[in-house]
Image: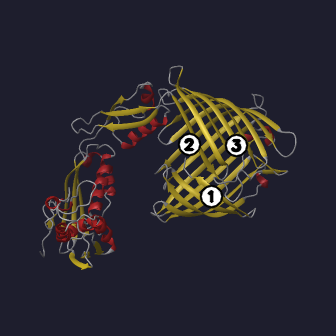
Amino acid sequence: MAGRSFDLLCAVRGLAAKRRTMKPLAPAAGHRPHSALSALIAFTALTTLTMATPAFAKYDVDIDAPRSIKKLLKDHLELSRFAKRDDVSDDQFQFLVTAAPKDVRDLVATEGFFTPVVRTDVTTVDDKRSVKVSVDPGPQTTIASVNLKFTGAVTTEDRTQENAARFAFSIHEGDPFTQDAWDSAKSAALKALQARRYLGARIVRSQARVNPRTHIADLSVTFDSGPTFTFGKLDISGTKRYPQKIIENVNPINEGEIYDVARVNELQRQVQNTPYYASVAIDVANDVEKPNETPLHIKVSEYPYHSVRYGVGYATDTGFHVQGAYSYLNTFGAAYPFTISGRLDQTQQYGRVQLAMPPDSRGWVNAVFGSYTITDVSDTNIYSARVGVQRSRSTQNIDTTYSLTFYDDRLTQNEPNPSTARALVPAWTWIRRDVDDPLFPRRGNVIRAEASFAVKNVLTDQTFARLYTNMQQYLSLGRSDLLVFRAEFGGVFTSGPSSGVPASLLFRAGGANSVRGYSYLGIGHNVSGSILPTKYMVTGSTEYQHWFTHDWGGAVFFDIGTATDTWGERVFQPGVGVGARWRSPVGPVNVDVAYGLKNKSIKPYLTLGIAF
């Protein structure tokens, strides 16, 4: 066969009709190819004819093959699979041995080995049969060329999408050829092309030409983008309890807007973030004959009017906790959510009552609330009661809240005479999330910023302005390594003492999400053993993670921070440590051991480290 190349759409060593795009290798969906269909039919017939034959004892199979294909053969070779049964007759056993070489060739071809040498040896010792299957797979086929062609509107309208599809095609010249990689690369490139504008894009031609003599493969795929799609009206189904207007009000997509899967995902998140829907499914028609203003079909499953949620948990800083909430989603018969929630742990008691309105035509939600918090940590007890109103909106990456809150705080410490402070505080809160994965981010950042103020004698004891910001940055270093940076700053600016500002608006540091190696909220102003909150706080952290497997990794880190009433008298408290990381089903679980360089203490930490 020297000098010949083989078109896998036609024939590769008699493996025709085995794969979709590489027909000689096509298995049924979700399965590896085994033997040919006719062989399976013959084996079934043979089983029927020999049902009356006494069962033969089980046999052993030893597969002598390189590690790269040994598991494949052990899991999918029919001779190996049937060895686990004790009802294989002598005739059936002979059939499996005879079919084994072809079965092996079919299987290893999916990994790019097209010239294997296969040998089967059967031995019998004390009526126990053993089969040794020896496989020399030969050289693995490598990719000599990749030719991606594009037709349709993408060639004149949006070359960026063409480039995105080319970039998503994940196999390149010089890579080993496998059927899984070939299928995955085509699927990823098509998905990238369909992600924006070209929802109806498809593969019109796909070919892998393999030369068994030189062990190289030439790949070619032709994509037809089809026309540009635009969004049309919402087609909503499943709404029974709550008005469809809720979904329309949080819809960020304008009719006539160019199709973008990111916008569809944003719509789904916006609807899911409301308290009314248990599930949201969105489908966009991809009829290339009707690409203009194609409708968005939204099917929702609604929550009942009444709902109760509860849970228990543990964190190193706060100990065991229980929490719960009750909601009624149809107050006044107008879909006003009313919620009572609370949490109790070893350092804090918290309760909140809120009545909100449905989203308005721009997606803003108005609410009134009342809450209380009792925090008892570091020999300092802070009671904070609050009532207020707020207006908030969530978009794809940004949450914005405006609020007006009245604070009534009381602080008790080791010294006598508790201090009290009141303030009416207008505030603005802004959160931006720009990460590649909400649960397990490897690139991007999360930024939070707050600004507020209060004016003396306007239900306020002391004039002040307050700023707070927090940023977490993720930087990927290859596939297995990650750098995480965190920076935090808080400041209360006032000409009077900090005792005139509500204590819950001041700052302390220390703990799992602050400066590790120190007690929770244990960095602040020490007065007779009580750690009091302060006007200023700065913390920072650098963490290096290495992932040994997909789910398990390790980390080393350095934290530093301070909290002080007088910036000129600040004292920074550093900490270092090591930790383990686990990608659990609900988010990253962090187990750390840290050493406080200033207080010379060792502290363990267990946290659920979600980026939000």
Task: Between label 2 and label 3, give the one nearer the viewer.
Answer: 3
Q: Which mark is residue 431?
A: 2
Near mark 3 (Cα within 10 A), the count class, few <14, some 14-19 or many ≥20, is some
Q: Is residue 118 visible?
A: yes
Task: Between label 1 and label 3, give the one nearer the viewer.
Answer: 3
Circles 1 and 2, Cβ within 8 Å, touching? The answer is no
Give, as a three-letter code, the residue at label 3: Gln
Give, as a three-letter code, the residue at label 1: Ser
Picture mark count: 3
Q: Secondary structure at mark 3?
A: strand
Q: Is residue 175 visible?
A: no
Indicate which disc, 1 or 3, sits on the residue closer to the N terminus.
Answer: 3
Residue under the image location 61 percent in, 36 percent down: 428
Give, as a three-letter code, the residue at label 2: Ile
Q: Quadrant of the N terminus?
A: bottom left
Cα–Cα gap, marks 1 and 2: 20 Å
414 with respect to 373 (left or right): right
The residue beneath circle 3 is: 348
Cα–Cα gap, marks 1 and 3: 26 Å
Q: Secondary structure at mark 1?
A: strand
Cα–Cα gap, marks 2 and 3: 25 Å
Indicate which disc, 1 or 2, sits on the residue closer to the N terminus.
Answer: 2
204 with respect to 589 (left or right): left
Front one among 53 and 144: 53
Q: Please tell me whether residue 495 is drawn above or below residue 365 in the rendered image.
A: below
Q: Secondary structure at mark 2?
A: strand
Circles 1 and 3, Cβ within 8 Å, touching? The answer is no
- Picture coordinates of residue 152, whole percent (x, y): 22, 46
Q: Which mark is residue 541?
A: 1
